[in-house]
Amino acid sequence: MPVTPTPRLLRPVVAPRRARAGRPGPAVATLLAVLLTGALAAGCGAAPAGDGPAGPAGPDLGTGGLRTTGDGAARATWLGGDLAPADSCADLAAAYADLGEDLVGPHGWEDPYFFLDSPFFAARGGAPELAASTRTASGPTAGMTRADPSATGTTVQEAGVDEPDTVKTEGSLLVRVAGGTLSTHDVGGSEVVGLGSLDLTATSLVDPELLLVGDTVVVVGRDRGAATTPRIAGTPTSTSTATSTRVLTVDVSDPTDPRVTASTAYDAGLVRAVQHGTVVRLVLSSDRPDLPFTTPRRAGGRTAATLANREVVRAATAADWLPGATVDDLTADGASTTAPAVACDDVAVPSQEAGLGTLAVLGLDAATPESAARSLVDPSGSGLLVDTDLAYASAERLYVATAPAWAGWDPTGAAGAGLTTVHELDLEGVSTSYVASGEVLGTLADRWAMDEVDGVLRLALGPAQGTGPANAVATLRRDGDRLVEAGRVDGLGRFESIESVRWFDDLAIVVTFRRVDPLHTVDLSDPDRPRLLGALTVPGFSAHLHPLGPRRLLGIGEGPDRGAWGAQVGLFDLGDLADPRPLGVHHFAAGTTLGASVDPRQLTWLPGARTALSVVYGPGRTRPHLAVVSLADGRVSARTLPLPRGTEARGVRTVLLADRRVVLLTDRSTTLLDAARLAPVPDPAPGSEQPPAR
């Protein structure tokens, strides 16, 4: 008898992002270093034992910094459990120094595990991560329901939680950013009409993306002109990369004249930007500060230099460790002010070491252009002394996870059990409050491996020492200020990596991959007793899973075809979750990639036409095409339409408007698509109208 999940809310997952590689325990790190680099020990040097002299405590920042909104919104609340605020800025600086002094050597900061981030190691599966996971927003259902975009046209991870993209729509207004220009357009007529534009090149923004809240556009991106990460000794070349973020608020109440109302740069990397109603939250992560370290001045001076550098770490103030915010004065004076983005007593210190870094959560009230500008100048902020970029936001909560020291299964047992710690934070208005913490056995690849429904956190876990070489799905439930594991199902895909996850209220679909693509269905209707329902194995893998209704699931990824490997789209029947079945597959030319398999924001589903749109591109400078994938009677057919030469594939978007028309956006144009060109067509001959093969 077919197994059908009970009614639930469907919540989908989005745009993939590479997760930071975990760090091994000392024994594993030493073994890998010898095997992979040979000369690592000689390059890094050993630090002498013992603690260096403590430097003077830094000044107490007190209530300084950007700690509350102008209307006096409550700050973060840290009560009990595994997180507690520092008593003073001096105590906070000491907490950072306790972690930092063991990470310096004669040349400053050292990272003896740099090989984990190298192409050599990554190409051999060193860092487990999701190639892409996807979930979608919807309402009550009695099975899978169609995955619909957010109200502003973006594929998002969570129902009611919008995310940035290069294009946003509301009513007849379309706002996009391309080539350093923000532009506004009227899409209410038979043609797209340009309204106004704003040059962003002078703002030092890199790769900007947008959130649209009424008449306010919040622009987020990397900051070209701000600080970079400090040089890490022991790496073969400088690993300095931009870890700074710039945020603008733009008033589009008059779309013919968009105006910047506030601009702030943070010396921290952007982990996430999300929108809950009219509140925009920024999750920022800062690493080790750039301190005035010394270097050996003579032969045999390594010990003295190391001790001196430890003293530098001890002398650093809280202001050195906390991420800074530089607020630009947009008046004629053009001055700027810099202060910590969070105050000392708004930073929580975990009871157990969770790495050296700061995760800051800032809340902005974007209800009006005026409130958005005020909030950006003076946001509600809170922070955690952790080194992580694993943060997942549901409609009411934020979960922050810190990975175990070694993210993977270690057959030697030297890496320890492999526990992941998760902190749960409640979100209300622009403020944040701590709720609970807990541990779970296994590793999280990225935020798409996390999901919350009715207060139950569900996790798709990669292997760890205590689990063996298989994956798992676990559920955690709050018990006071603790997150306690409620249920677990192990044994998913032995010696395989998790490629994608699709979450529903009482169902998880997990795709693992090594040489073939097992698709696992997991029953979560009883969070205390999750169970594996069924599995399906097909060639290749699905990096993005897109539900089309109660029975059908679209899988977008890659696979083999006649001895060659390229993009593919598969259709699955999940009417019986215990027996998922493949219905059809379409292979694109060898060497091609579908944009939606890398960034799910590049997929648009047209329900009336039973058609999916995405960009498809080949290697090198191959001309990108628009893939038009049609479904009929369980069959999958596709054709491709060439895009203008020189089009950048990653910038292509298709947006479904409220009246069901489609806008095609490239880095060169914004146009309405001719509906006749999107009509279902017979499957073309192999290779016809496709980007050239490799």
Image (spheres, helix red, strand yellow):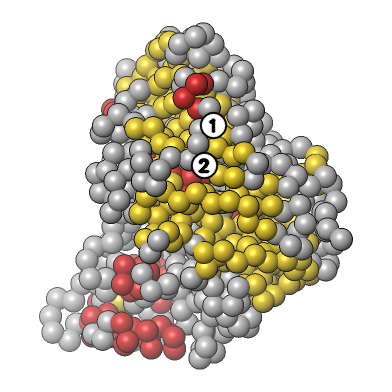
Looking at the rendered image, the quarter that the N terminus falls into is: bottom right
Q: Is residue 210 left or right of residue 110?
A: right
Q: What amino acid does circle 2 point to?
A: Ser
Residue drawn at 83 percent across, 67 percent down: 528
Is residue 3 visible to us here?
A: yes
Q: Earlier in the sequence, mark 2 or mark 1?
A: 2
Is residue 344 visible to us here?
A: no
Q: Is residue 506 left or right of residue 644?
A: right
Residue drawn at 30 percent across, 76 percent down: 105
Q: What amino acid does circle 1 point to?
A: Pro
- Report the residue that reaches farthest toward the bottom: 412
Q: Are marks 2 and 1 in contact (CB under 8 Å)?
A: yes
Where in the figure is residue 272, as x and y percent of width and height?
Answer: 52, 46
- Residue topped by disc 2: 637
> For this rendering, which residue is in front, 248 or 586?
586
581 is higher (above) or lower (below) than 427: below
- The quadrant in which residue 524 appears is bottom right
Question: 10 Å neighbourhood of mark 2: few (<14), some, or many (≥20)?
Answer: many
Residue 680: mark: 1
- The quadrant in which residue 560 appears is bottom left
Residue drawn at 72 percent across, 53 percent down: 574
> For this rendering, which residue is in front, 369 or 138?
138
